[in-house]
Amino acid sequence: MNEENLSLERLQKRIAASGICSRRAAEKLIEDGKVTVNGSVITELGTKVSPEDVIAVNGKTLNIAKKHYLVMNKPKGYITTLSDPQNRQNVSMLLPDMGHQLKPIGRLDKDTEGVLLFTNDGDLINKLLHPSYHVEKEYLATVEGCIQPKSIKKLESGLFIEGRKTKPAKVNVKHVDKDNNISTILITISEGRKHQVKIMCQMVGHFVKHLKRTRFGSIQLDKLKPGMCRLLTKPEVEKLKNPKLISTIIK
Ligand code: URA
């Protein structure tokens, strides 16, 4: 399914989501010829509409879709997609029904857990994922081997992935377990390249055994249990929208 298809939804669902009536009642309104989309009467129940379409019921234009913002603690084993032809476990199965199709802001690997934001605010998604907008993402990584200052320096100053140097990162060593030959590090990056943390760690000789995103911008994982979601508060949404309010450890 492409990005455009994802934002399409059934007309009756959109009408119901505006809060004026139930989905069943919306279907009746459509069949009775009371609904227009961009000025044309629509009586076909399967009609799909995009967020840009102007919908009117009995001549009255519906309010623009309410914006929803939530954070999920994505569990391991779920893929970051909203539909899967093979019906594998995916994050849409964990989302509450908000009456609108919420999309993930970026993605996490199947075996990565932690903070994954969702919204139907396309402007915010585009903004946060734009390469010029360096949102910090913090990961707790358990890696093989006892990490040395030399490796930390390399991770922090940047490594070449597919010919492009990674932006400066910040690494805090949380624990080095010499007996079991593993280290736990908190790594903060400001890009979202595919498998970035795993590749960076692998490049300095440390295979990532376990990865958890603990923060995206100003949104922390806190006590959210794996598989659970919570709505963001208004101040949290404002902070995400306003780059000046997002702390910048990385310059
Ligand atoms: N880096 C990775 O390697 N995997 C993720 O899921 C996120 C960041």
Image: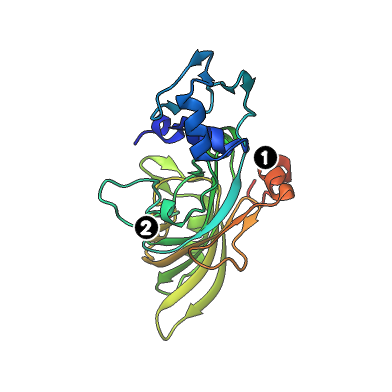
Residue 227 appears left or right of 66: left
Using the image, determine if residue 205 lies above or below residue 124. below
Q: What residue does disc 1 label?
A: 241
Q: Position of residue 203 (x, y in %)?
A: 37, 57
Q: Please name whichever residue, 58 or 233, is drawn nearer the observer in this view of the structure.
A: 58
Ligand 1, image quadrant it occupies: bottom left
Q: Secondary structure at mark 2?
A: loop
Residue that appears at 45% across and 26% down:
31
Identity of the amino acid at label 2? Lys
- N-terminal of the two: label 1 or label 2? 2
Residue 104 appears left or right of 67: left
Q: Please name whichever residue, 214 or 49, is drawn nearer the observer in this view of the structure.
A: 49
Q: Please name whichever residue, 202 or 130, is drawn nearer the observer in this view of the structure.
A: 130
Residue 195 appears left or right of 158: left
Residue that appears at 46% across and 70% down:
147
> Based on the displayed image, in which of its 4 quarters is residue 79 positioned?
bottom left
**Quadrant occupied by the N terminus:** top left
The dot on residue 110 is: 2
Using the image, determine if residue 135 lies above or below residue 115. above
> Based on the displayed image, in which of its 4 quarters is residue 181 positioned?
bottom left
